[in-house]
Structures are given as C-alpha cells and as structure tokens.
Amino acid sequence: MPYTTEEGGRLNNFAKEPVVYQAEDPTGVEKRNYVVLGIVAAALVGGLVFVAFSVSSVS
C-alpha cells in the first residue's frame, strides 16, 4: 500500500491506481449487434406506447 506521512506524523493511505488502456473500435459484428439491439428497443418502446394509447380512455 502506498502510504505517505503528513505533517504531525499522520499516515495517509492512497488507493491503488487502475491500469489504463486505450479503448478499441467495435468490430463489424459488434456494430451490427448494436443496430439490431437498437431496432428491438425502438420496437419495444413503440409497442408499449401503442398499448398504452389503446387501453387508455382517450378517444
């Protein structure tokens, strides 16, 4: 553990720093999966809105 001693003799404990790495670009398969998941999410939200309007008492 990395300790430092401050004035007055107090010890200060610092957290271990995480390893930093460069993010990689998504592959073609990952991009396709993102598009498919976006379409499924949009269809789900659209379906929920349709059901909400169809069961409401708004004429």
Image (cartoon, helix red, strand yellow):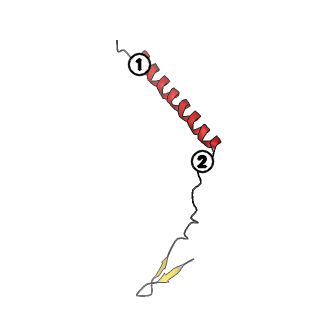
**Total label count?**
2
Query: At which x and y percent is residue 41?
Result: 52, 32
User: In which quarter of the view is residue 40 placed?
Assistant: top right
Task: Give the mark nearer the N terminus: 1 vs 2.
Answer: 2
Secondary element at image label 1: helix
Quadrant of the image occupied by residue 33: top right
- Is label 2 in a helix, a strand or a loop? loop
At 35% across and 15% down in the image, what residue appears? 58
Q: Residue furthest bottom?
A: 8
**Residue at 52%, 80% in the rendered image:** 3
User: Dot 2 surroundings within 10 Å: few (below 14), some, or many (20 or more)?
Assistant: few
Q: What number is the disc on residue 26?
A: 2
Relative to 2, is 22 above or below?
above
The residue to which callout 1 is attached is: 53
The percent coordinates of residue 38 (x first, y second) are 53, 34
Quarter occupied by the N terminus: bottom right
How many neighbours does mark 1 have within 10 angstroms: few (below 14), some (14-19), or many (20 or more)?
A: few
**Residue at image coords 52%, 27%:** 44
Work out whether 24 lies above or below 46: below
Q: Position of residue 31 (x, y in %)?
A: 59, 41
Quadrant location of the C terminus? Answer: top left
Amino acid on which disc 1 is placed: Phe
**x, y (%) of residue 17?**
54, 69
Please state if 42 lies on the left or on the right of 36 as rendered.
left
Which residue lies at the image location 45% right of the left edge and 87% below the top edge? 9
What is the spatial separation of the Cα atoms under label 1 and label 2, in whole angstroms? 38 Å
Q: Which of marks 1 and 2 is in front?
A: 2
Q: What amino acid is at disc 2?
A: Pro
Q: Nearer the viewer, residue 18 or 2?
A: 18
